[in-house]
Amino acid sequence: MSRTCPVTGKKPMSGKNVSHSMRHTCRRWNVNMQTTTIVVDGKKQKIRVSAAGLRTLRKNAKAKAPVAEEAK
């Protein structure tokens, strides 16, 4: 399964671990992928998104939600 977020496009980063003795070994920083269920065209669908992508989805869903009128 791909470790690329479909919302933000984030991918794993690579670099080096550097020990106290300055030895360099390769390492990889993976994306914080979360499995979540979203509704697309009235159907539930499971997707894997990054934590930042999940925040974006929730933010956009909140913006599109109808605003209830306040009771006076």
Image (cartoon, rainbow, N blue to C red):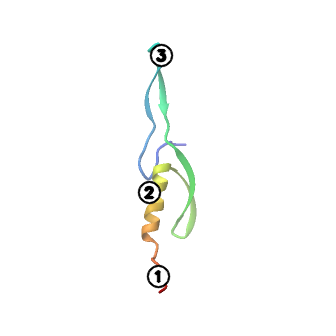
Q: Where is residue 54 in the image (x, y as percent from the top left)?
A: 49, 54
Which circle marks residue 56 in the picture? 2
Q: What is the three-letter code of the residue carrying label 1?
A: Glu
Q: Is residue 44 left or right of residue 28?
A: right
**Extreme bottom residue here?**
72
Q: Residue at x 45, y 77 (%)?
A: 67
N-terminal of the two: label 3 or label 2?
3
Crowding around mark 3 (Cα neighbors within 10 Å: few <14, some 14 to 19, many 20+) is: few
N-terminal of the two: label 3 or label 1?
3
Q: What is the three-letter code of the residue carrying label 2?
A: Thr
Kindly check if marks 3 and 2 are in contact, taking CB atoms under 8 A apart as contact. Answer: no
Q: How far apart are marks 1 and 2 (CA)?
A: 27 Å
The N terminus lies in quadrant: top right
Q: Distance between the residues labelled 3 and 2?
A: 39 Å
Q: Residue at x 41, y 50 (%)?
A: 8
Residue pointed to by mark 3: 20
Residue pointed to by mark 1: 70
Crowding around mark 1 (Cα neighbors within 10 Å: few <14, some 14 to 19, many 20+) is: few
Q: Where is residue 71 in the image (x, y as percent from the top left)?
A: 49, 85
Judged from the image, the secondary structure of the residue bearing numbered disc 2 is helix
Q: Which of 37 and 20 is in front in this view?
A: 20
